Image (cartoon, grey):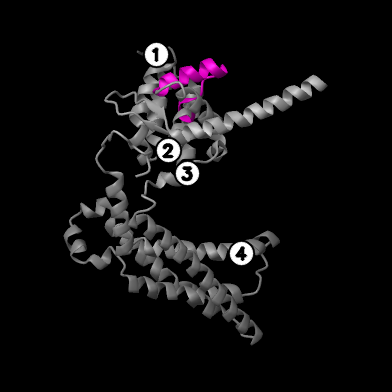
């Protein structure tokens, strides 16, 4: 199931950060949290993190990896990769336009 | 790896708050969330975050924990739509009848008003007693044997519900036919049609909650919610 990150509503930013974190490889909740903190400078709340994970998992953009540990790792699915690529392309376009406008100002 | 640098009280509160999440969510994510709370420093900000998302999960349709594609899910949808259609139909018919009564200069006497309003007591008392007979405390009492021998005491048959629902018609006609009372403000009067629909909806739900069909639906729901905790290799979300 493909779609847009905007469909996650208020969890779209957390969802995006999770997809970016998982692009490197499977990670569990705590590892994702640390990675997101390193990338963005702020740590998502545990509730927000799992609300976003549940929504990403429901859309089959990520999936849990079989594990006997309580810390269950997740990995990025092909649909999730597509959604992430689409969002990154949109952000690059915004960034290009913004840079051009700043240069002209 | 543990990072217990936050407040212990906040951590305990956060763990307690996980019980506020919908059961299907807890069955799927509680264990992982507990592991995460073991790893991170938990402060009151995190507690607030968990409480906030618990409310959001309850507002999400997934909170019902019902398989959307299952028979129980479909039954629930059909039931909800049927009640809504019923409420609007009943209200519409009552409006037409009331308009005709007004056109024919029919006066509603106080006696008729009282009589029709008192009609509503019988089904209400019936539903309340059925609910009381189903209570655990009553089921443990010495009358439990007698009560359980007569199932009709605890459950309403579909026909009984239909019969009780018909009583609602004169009540609704009366509501539409009576003139605006002196105490009714403009806002109250404007909101009245919505209140009427809500009244029918509430009353119908109250009655149907004690029917055998509804009890069967609830049984399916509880069977799902209390299913054993299994952790398959690939879980496609906490959708059942």
Q: Mark 2 or mark 3: which is in front?
A: 2
Q: Mark 4 or mark 3: which is in front?
A: 3
Residue beneath disc 2: A60
Could you tell me how far apart the alpha carbons at marks 4 and 2 are, in whole angstroms? 46 Å
Please state which of residues A39 and B48 is positioned toward the viewer in this rendering: A39
Mark toward the start of the polypeptide (3 vs 1): 1
Which range is magenta? A27-48
Could you tell me how far apart the alpha carbons at marks 4 and 1 are, in whole angstroms? 56 Å
Quick check: marks 4 and 2 in contact, CB under 8 Å? Answer: no
Could you tell me how far apart the alpha carbons at marks 4 and 3 are, in whole angstroms? 30 Å
**What numbered label is drawn on residue B4?**
1
Whether A28 is among the magenta residues is yes
Residue B125 against residue B13 in the figure, above or below: below
Subunit of label 2: A
* Residue B201 is at least partly visible in this image: yes
Please state which of residues B105 and B99 is positioned toward the viewer in this rendering: B99
Residue farthest along the right direction in this orientation = A105
Residue beneath disc 4: B192
Q: Mark 4 or mark 2: which is in front?
A: 2
Q: Secondary structure at mark 1?
A: loop
**What numbered label is drawn on residue B60?**
3
Q: Residue at x 40, y 36 (%)?
A: B20
Q: What is the x, y in percent for residue A105? A: 83, 21
Q: Mark 4 or mark 1: which is in front?
A: 1
């Amino acid at each position: 199931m493909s779609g847009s990150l905007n469909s996650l509503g208020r969890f779209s930013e957390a969802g995006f950060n999770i997809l970016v974190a998982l692009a490197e490889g499977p990670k569990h909740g705590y590892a994702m949290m640390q990675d997101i903190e390193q990338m963005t400078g702020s740590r998502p709340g545990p509730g927000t993190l799992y609300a976003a994970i549940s929504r990403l998992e429901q859309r089959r953009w990520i999936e849990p990896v079989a594990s006997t540990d309580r810390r269950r790792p997740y990995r990025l699915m092909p649909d999730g990769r597509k959604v992430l690529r689409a969002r990154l392309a949109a952000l690059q376009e915004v960034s290009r336009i913004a840079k051009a406008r700043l240069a002209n100002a | 790896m543990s990072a217990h640098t936050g407040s212990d009280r906040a951590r305990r509160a956060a763990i307690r708050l996980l019980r506020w999440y919908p059961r299907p969510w807890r069955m799927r994510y509680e264990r992982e969330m507990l592991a995460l709370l073991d790893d991170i420093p938990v402060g009151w900000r995190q507690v607030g975050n968990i409480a906030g998302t618990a409310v959001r999960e309850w507002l999400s349709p997934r909170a019902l924990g019902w398989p959307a594609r299952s028979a129980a899910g479909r039954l629930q949808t059909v039931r909800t739509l049927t009640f809504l259609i019923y409420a609007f139909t009943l209200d519409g018919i009552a409006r037409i009848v009331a308009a005709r009564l007004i056109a024919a200069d029919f006066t509603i006497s106080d006696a008729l008003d009282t009589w029709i309003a008192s009609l509503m007591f019988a089904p209400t008392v019936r539903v309340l007693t059925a609910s009381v007979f189903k209570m655990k405390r009553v089921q443990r009492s010495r009358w439990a044997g007698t009560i359980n021998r007569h199932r009709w005491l605890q459950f309403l048959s579909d026909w009984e519900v239909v019969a009780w629902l018909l009583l609602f018609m004169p009540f609704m006609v009366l509501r539409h036919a009576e003139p605006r009372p002196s105490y009714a403000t403009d806002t109250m009067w404007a909101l009245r049609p919505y209140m009427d629909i809500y009244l029918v909806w509430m009353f119908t739900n109250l009655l149907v909650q004690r029917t055998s069909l509804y009890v069967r639906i609830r049984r399916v729901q509880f069977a799902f919610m209390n299913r054993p905790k299994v952790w398959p290799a690939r879980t496609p979300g906490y959708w059942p």
